[in-house]
Amino acid sequence: MRSRNPVFSRRGFSRDNGYAGFNTAPQAGGPAVTTQGNPYAQPTGNPYAQNPYAQQGLQQGAPPQAPATTGRMTMDDVVLRTASTLGTLIVTAALAWALLPVDDAHIGRSYGIGIGAALVGMVLAFVQSFKRTASPALILSYAAFEGVFLGVVSSVVDNRIASGAAMQAVIGTMAVFAAVLVAYRAGWIRVNRRFYGFVMAAALGFVLLMMVNLLFAVFGGGDGLGFRSGGLGIFFGVIGVILGACFLALDFKQVEDGIAYGAPRQEAWLAAFGLTLTLVWIYMEFLRILAILNSND
């Protein structure tokens, strides 16, 4: 399945623009999936049966098996790359927190650097999203710049609005990650086409509303339409966390399919990139909720 993060930018595990799990296979009533080069595969019109990483001698309609060949992505690869990406983000966030003070004399400069880092990180994320292959240098650079932004924003919220908010947001993000992982592994969350379509439609509506709110805030002043402050802000923050949890489920499905169908090891970097994007999304929503709750006190 092609999973996209809330920024709608990450490419899925692919081979020749194919995607693990749900692929660009013929729909019901269309021509059968090609079986050229595979003497064991049977023609089928089932779009769920095509393996974008199918190797000769394997029946495409059979249940996927973890590849025994070298050079294929494993769970250890995903964990290692994700740890490297998140580790880079955490280190730069800690450095930004320590080296970019947010007192009255320095907050303008620090916040300016943080916003600049966020813009650079966004550009790097979009560049990686449109590349056909994963670039570790781009992904780690994105994590570094995003960490600077998160360090400054977290410091502002923690020191000037809600003491302890950053740690609470971290704990909340870890709790969501653990809960979704347990629910996914237990089969309580079923990631299928209906789930994917619902999440994408909801995320698109959410992002459009936030963009409209931002435009009203920029040109009209104040809090725009109020979607990011007060009771509405808390409501939309909770919706944002729920959407982030749904994208985590899509990420887990993508990783599972990539391993099962024999994705190249290099694509473990895409898994790390996507998981990092999703976790940053969830963290920022938690931080925003905590800031709103404390500003209302």
Image (tube, rainbow, N blue to C red):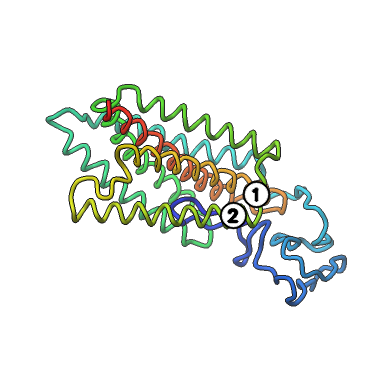
Quadrant location, the C terminus: top left
Seen from the viewer's position, the closer of residues 176 and 269 is 176
User: Which residue is depicted at the point 18% across and 54% down?
Assistant: 220
Quadrant location, the N terminus: bottom right
* Amino acid type indicated by mark 2: Tyr
Q: Secondary structure at mark 1?
A: loop
Looking at marks 2 and 1 on the same chain, the residue that comes earlier in the sequence is marked by: 1
Q: Where does label 1 land, which residue?
A: 191
Q: Secondary structure at mark 2?
A: helix
Query: Label 2 neighbourhood size at 10 Å, few (<14), some (14-19), many (20+)?
Result: many
Could you tell me residue 70's position as x and y percent? 71, 49
- Residues under labels 2 and 1: Cα distance? 7 Å
* Amino acid type indicated by mark 1: Val
161 vs 266: above or below: above
Could you tell me residue 203's position as x and y percent? 47, 53
Mark drawn on residue 35: none
Along the horizontal axis of the image, is 15 left or right of 6?
right
User: Which residue is depicted at the point 13% across and 29% down?
Assistant: 104
User: Which residue is depicted at the point 18% across and 49% down?
Assistant: 221
Could you tell me residue 26's position as x and y percent? 70, 72
Could you tell me residue 96's position as x and y percent? 30, 33
1 vs 232: above or below: below
Q: In which quadrant of the rendered view does residue 29 lie?
A: bottom right
Seen from the viewer's position, the closer of residues 201 and 15 is 201
User: In the image as oriented, which residue stretches furthest toward the front?
Assistant: 231
Q: In which quadrant of the rendered view does residue 18 lie?
A: bottom right
For the residues labelled 2 and 1, say whether their Cβ atoms are less than 8 Å apart: yes
Q: Where does label 2 land, which residue?
A: 196
293 vs 47: above or below: above
